[in-house]
Image: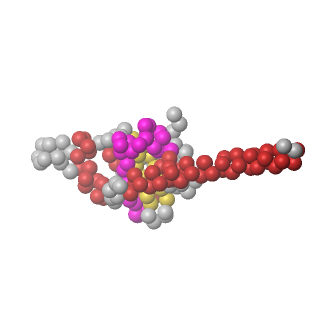
Amino acid sequence: MDDRTFYFYTIAFILCLLLLSLIVPLYRKHKINDQIKGLANNTLEMTPKQFMQMRKQSLGGRGKPSYALKKNFAGVYILYNKTKNKYYVGQAKQILNRVNAHFTGKGNGDVYADYKYGDEFTIKMIALENSGYKTLNELERNTISVYNAFSKGYNKTRGNKG
């Protein structure tokens, strides 16, 4: 093999590696995007009013525990401000309690202010169980990224580490 051929193959190999280093992260991001959107699209979307009604509902009548006491779960929630086209993504071990806090003034102050002054919101909740994710942190980070909740939404961080 002469020097020209060697240089040609070396440059071609380096270009292939560079191209691969660009394609793999894009593929991973696309796969994560599809996974999160799939999880979110397979969950019930509700307004804060519907959420509050569901949360207070009794399981089986008078004297029985409320839905929120028995059906709380670990997961990620997506609060969408339809008026301003902004998202807030959070995580909780008891998701119903945490979502409630945002709409009663004990959560994100910006979300509550916009809600209080009339902005229209929807809520989606994704359970950690059967999501394909091992930790709430990982699920939250990816959901924040997919919905641009840090760069264009209410989130002040990209999510918890670890």
Q: Residue furthest right?
A: 3
**Residue depicted at x 38% and y 42%:** 128
- Let me know if residue 121 is in the magenta part: yes
Residue 28 can be seen in this image = yes
Q: Is residue 9 rendered magenta in the image?
A: no
Residue 66 pos. (x, y %): 21, 45
Residue furthest top in the image: 162
Which residue: 40% across, 60% down?
121
Front-lying residue, 138 or 53: 138
> x and y percent of residue 143 in the render?
48, 49
Residue 22 is situated, as x and y percent measured from the top left of the image, at 66, 50
**Range shown magenta:** 117-141
Q: Nearer the viewer, residue 130 or 107?
A: 130
Residue located at (32% from left, 56% from top): 44
Image-based side of 12 in relation to 145, left or right: right
Q: Residue at x 17, y 46 (%)?
A: 59
